Amino acid sequence: MAAPLSRGLANEAASGVVLLVMAAIALLWANSPGAAAYEALWTTPLGFELGPLSFTRDLRWWVNDGLMTLFFFVVGLEIRRELHAGELSTLRRAALPLAAALGGMIVPALIYAGFNAGLPTAGGWGVPMATDIAFAVGVLALLGKRVPPALRVLLLALAVIDDLGAIVIIALFYAKGFSLAGLGVGVAGLGLIGLLQLLGVRSPWAYVPAALLAWAGTYASGVHPTIAGVAVGLMTPVTAWWGRERLAQVTAEVGASLREGGGLHSAIATVEAGAQEALSPVDRLQHALHGWVAWGILPLFALANAGVSLGSASLQDGGLRVFLGVSLGLVLGKALGVWGLARLAVAAGLAAFPRGVGGRALWVVAAVAGIGFTMAIFVAGLAFPPGPHLETAKLAILTASAVAGVAGLGLGRLLLPAAAEASTTD
């Protein structure tokens, strides 16, 4: 189990660097003499016409509502896997990250609400609730061997629950113009996926039309269409058709056939099919899509959305409250919520620290949890209409994420021993 986890963490850390570069490019571009070209690029209309049917949206919409559905699909796959055999498979294992994630969502929302209650900007309470796993893991990677493996696993589990919470909030509180008919179409798409699974259809491509139907129906219903990606991910099977024993048996039979002069082409085809069938659909799809999401879709999202025009951001007309609510919610709310509720759960006997992780190490996770970026910017785009408040919220997210990253790195060097031998009794 350690090798896939290490590869996944390395991939997340490296993709975090790419995200940072893309965000910097977007920020510089949006505040350069080429700012008009930046905005013109992302407002370029794209679509299609088929007889009387016409569907046209700007390029930023296709990134945020279209491509980001694949990101949410991969998130759904990760949640499904963790619920089946990971850190969320039993209540005892999930108790600590669950408590930490709940604290990291509730306290930031309360801080934001404290600054904006009763104002037109009150709807932005969901913005500071999210953690960006790529950047957070990247900070832990910079700490090297100081970080015990269990601490990385805790951060990953916390981020999975955090993503699930953000998805629920998007679905329940940021839906616009709800349509029951559209929801019916989306449910029909999910039902068709279930039917294909019952019929034993194995090709992933066979599910694409049904997934597109679910996406279109969800969009028409007023619920953000990326929720369809999560739903499809959660429906993906977690058990392999063959499994380890069947693969070993078939491989042995192929080897025996080759030694007896059997055909090479048929042997290769059997082994290739076995390699596919030995992995569960969740593992196979996550492996196939994770690179595209981490190295393509998320950097493109950062380039499209991190271009905050500093001249457009404003601390007037409620802007200061938005900035303080988001930035303090991420930096202070996340840290206090994650650490406080996790420690409370341990003190109450509802959860236990894993080996090598204690209260001092928990502060590091609590600090880096304040890096919001991808999901926070995504929610901000739903909470605020285009204008000064949205730009101010994005600026607060970028500022807070930078502060949280530096704080996490500093706390890691201060609190984590170089040999990564943190006491569980601290």
Image (cartoon, grey):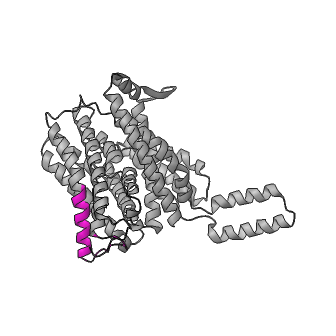
The total number of labels drawn is 0
Specify whether 423 is left or right of 77. left
In front here: 155 or 391?
A: 155
Q: Position of residue 13 (x, y in %)?
A: 43, 52
Residue 348 within the segment the image draws in magenta:
yes
Q: Given the current orientation, which residue lies at the most extreme bottom position?
A: 349
Residue at 22% across, 46% down:
326
Q: Position of residue 151 (x, y in %)?
A: 37, 65
In front here: 348 or 295?
A: 295
Q: Can residue 121 be seen by looking at this rendering?
A: yes
In front here: 187 or 414?
A: 414
Q: Which range is magenta?
A: 334-358
Q: Quadrant of the C terminus?
A: bottom left
Quadrant location of residue 57?
top left
Compared to residue 172, the image places residue 323 above or below, namely: above
Q: Given the current orientation, which residue lies at the most extreme right position?
A: 261
Residue at 69% across, 58% down:
273
Residue 132 within the segment the image draws in magenta:
no
Q: Can residue 176 be seen by looking at this rendering?
A: no
In front here: 312 or 233?
A: 312
Compared to residue 399, the image places residue 103 above or below, namely: below
Specify whether 47 is left or right of 271. left
Specify whether 277 is left or right of 99. right
Q: Position of residue 205 (x, y in %)?
A: 59, 48
Q: Position of residue 293 (x, y in %)?
A: 48, 46
Residue at 49% across, 60% down:
6
